[in-house]
Amino acid sequence: MTRSSTTRRRFLAALGAAGLGGLTGCTGIGALSNDSDVPTATPRSPPSGPADTAATVRPAPAQAASGLSPDTWIYNEGFPGPQLRVPEGDVLEVELANGLPRETTVHWHGVPVANPMDGVPGVTQQPAGPGESFTYRFRAEPAGTYFFHSHVGLQLDRGLLAPLIVEESDPHVEYDREYTVVLDDYLDGAPQPLYEGTDSGGRGPGMGGGGPGMGGMMGDRRPPYAALLANGRPPNDPQRLDVREGQRVRVRFINASSATYFRVRLGGHPMTVTHADGRPVDPVAVDSFRFGAGERYDVVVDATNPGTWELLATALNGRESPARALLSYDGGTSAPVSPSATGRELSYGDLVARTPIDGLDGSPDRTFDLTLSAGQSGWLIDGQAYPDADPLRIREGEHVRVTMRNRSPVVHPMHLHGHFFQVGNAVKDTVVVPGHMGTVTFDFLADNPGNWLFHCHNLYHLESGMARLIQYVE
Ligand code: C2O
Ligand code: CU
């Protein structure tokens, strides 16, 4: 079908044509996206000198013995991949050794790395082919809860994800022990694009009944997930997070899903949110929080209520059983108690960053007013589907304001590479724009020259075009 092959071409173009066997005629990385006559700004260089911490990331298909689908691709034989931990300020060097039958990259979600280290194929690097490697190098700062994942096609939903923890030298809250909880939506087959081919009936993703751009039944299509997982474990085989009475536990939650908006609740205990997307906030006690793909929250929990308690992460936009873990005192085996359905839920307005971004006082130097909507064959920003979309051009030093207005009924977790932004009183790198004309404004300081992707972190929305390049020009 014509429409389908058009979409296919665009998808390949989104991979920087590398899917077609390389970038003929382009030798330098600067050539990858500098396709206009506007001179682009020179990116920062990665740190030089010896690395403080070195690691190797080996993506490969899952082995039969792992119990995972043979269509699952994983890092270092684990799912999720191994947690990379590094003290803040260290120079981290990570070799990507590609054991996949396809090309891949690693993106360090949330870390403001130098542009050539950002892992976006066709924008910041040529991907590593099968058997090839690529060395990433960056200073691990600021401290926080991050994750890393492939940025090629739909590989994130194949399993190529893992936590990255940059340890704080001086945390603003004390705690006795900590856990990381990676939440994911797990497919047991190879992911397929949702918005191309015949099954969309030639209608757009939001056109199930509401008319163009307004959305309808098809608006929140998700792949046929086999399960929602917490740290790679299905709900009927939950991990136990062991605590002792009197301890304070820090839990780092990562929404590493590709298409799931989670609501997280814990039985028997309030959760005190201490960090949003890794950045410290004034502690705020809640009973639940919601987060979109790409967002992270750290909480502390005071273990003052012995027993076995369920930690549940429910899909707000899906029907799978909630992802599940157990908070378990002293190895006890009492029947787990569920969280209550009610209570106080975190809202963005509750988040007050301990360290706001400097240089954003006063009015912005540049503003973008962007509409998020559904098109005929995918998801759009201001009516355009990436890569057939105009870059958003900015200059170094500018205070940039971005307003997003959501004309669809579906949430869009919008993520900016290379920068944190100020949204209300919070500092984040990913923010959910609610459906039905939800509007979010963020501000950032243009302090990291290069070409940066700004996109919806619903992988299927991204794949269908919901992205723009933010381009620094001279
Ligand atoms: Cu996790 Cu382009 O992002
Ligand atoms: Cu989206």
Image (cartoon, grey):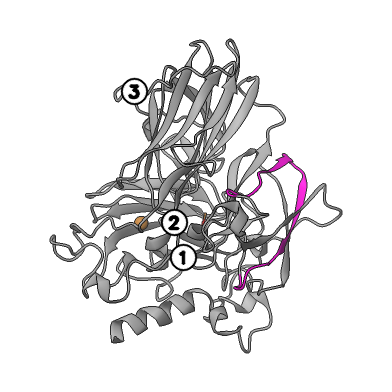
Tag 2, which secondary structure? loop
Q: Which residue is mark 2?
A: 187
Q: Are marks 2 and 1 in contact (CB under 8 Å)?
A: yes
Where in the figure is residue 360, as x and y percent of width and height? 50, 43
Find the distance from the CA under tag 2 to the CA under tag 1: 7 Å
Find the distance from the CA under tag 1 to the CA under tag 3: 38 Å
Q: Amino acid at mark 1?
A: Ala
Membership of 88 in magenta stretch: yes
Q: Which residue is mark 1?
A: 190
Residue at point 29% right, 68% down?
A: 383
Find the distance from the CA under tag 3 to the CA under tag 2: 32 Å
Q: Which residue is mark 3?
A: 344
Q: Is residue 47 left or right of residue 13?
A: right
Tag 1, which secondary structure? loop
Where in the figure is residue 461, as x and y percent of width and height? 37, 62
The magenta segment is 79-103
Where in the figure is residue 473, as x and y percent of width and height? 55, 68
- Disc number at residue 48? none
Q: Residue furthest front?
A: 65
Q: Residue furthest bottom?
A: 25
Residue at point 54% right, 67% down?
A: 152
Asked if 69 appears above or below 293 in the picture, the reply is below
Q: Determine which quarter of the picture holds residue 56.
A: bottom right
Q: Is residue 404 left or right of residue 361?
A: left
Asked if 252 appears above or below 375 in the picture, the reply is above
Pointer 1 or 3: first along the chain: 1
